[in-house]
Image: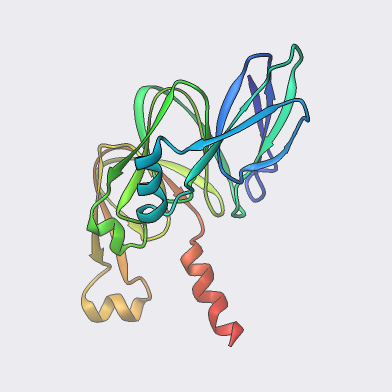
Amino acid sequence: MKYDIRYKPAFAAIFLTLNPGDRIIAEAGAMLSMAAKLSMTTQFSGGLIPALLKKFFGGESLFVNEFSNPTQQSLELVLSQSTVGDIVAIELNGNEICFQPGAYIAHTPGIQMNVQWAGFSSWLAGEGLFKLKLSGNGLVFFGGYGGVSQRRVDGEFIVDSGHLVAYDPGIKMNLRLAGGLVGSVTSGEGLVNRLSGQGRIYLQSRSLDGLVRFIRPKLR
């Protein structure tokens, strides 16, 4: 299988070439276009119980679609995300990665999808009680609103709520006021994520919550 992420960073889309026998699993609604000879089947995302947890407590879709190439020729599949922004591909080699709601797009066979308790701090930040965790060996595609950047955390790091997209399991989240009570309100920062631990984090340059706050007064 070959892939090419085009139109980065604002309108990214994944152009995949599936060779005979290739398969890829994608979030429901991620397919932009596909060759007519590709096969598509729908299944629960990680199994029935994990899918229900993802849907009702984690803000993810209940189903995923598996695309496969049953022919003897290479066929094209194009995937994208619902938000305007960047897409990143990473390769897992026996390690794990956690995603905030809405970030996951697709993965290749050899990757396992699970849900894990995220804690009440995540829920208060509007990110759901459960987080999506992918592990195994293979490619994983995910996206964010705006540009996506990677940073290495070693110790503590503060991220504005709504900008964290993905992170290594060794990263712990703690929701805190940006400053004192008055300062947090008047600064417009409110609650922030105080991250601790060691590992990679991926940040999106824009926040959907910020977009909603910007648009809402103009609709009145």
Residue 12 % position (x, y)? 65, 44
Residue at the front extreme, as displayed: 48
Frontmost residue, 193 versus 158 = 193
Q: Residue at x 77, y 30 (%)?
A: 35
Identify whether 99 is placed above or below 186. Answer: above
Left/right placement of residue 24 relative to residue 71 reads: left
Q: Residue at x 34, y 56 (%)?
A: 128
Q: Split into 4 quadrants, where in the image is the C terminus?
A: bottom right
Left/right placement of residue 34 relative to residue 101 reads: right
Frontmost residue, 137 versus 38 = 38
Residue 20 % position (x, y)? 68, 14
Identify whether 217 is placed above or below 126. Answer: below
Can residue 201 be seen here? The reply is no
Residue 194 % position (x, y)? 26, 55
Frontmost residue, 45 versus 200 = 45
Identify whether 127 is placed above or below 6. Answer: below
Left/right placement of residue 109 relative to residue 14 reads: left
For the rendered model, the colour scheme is rainbow
Q: Residue at x 45, y 38 (%)?
A: 45
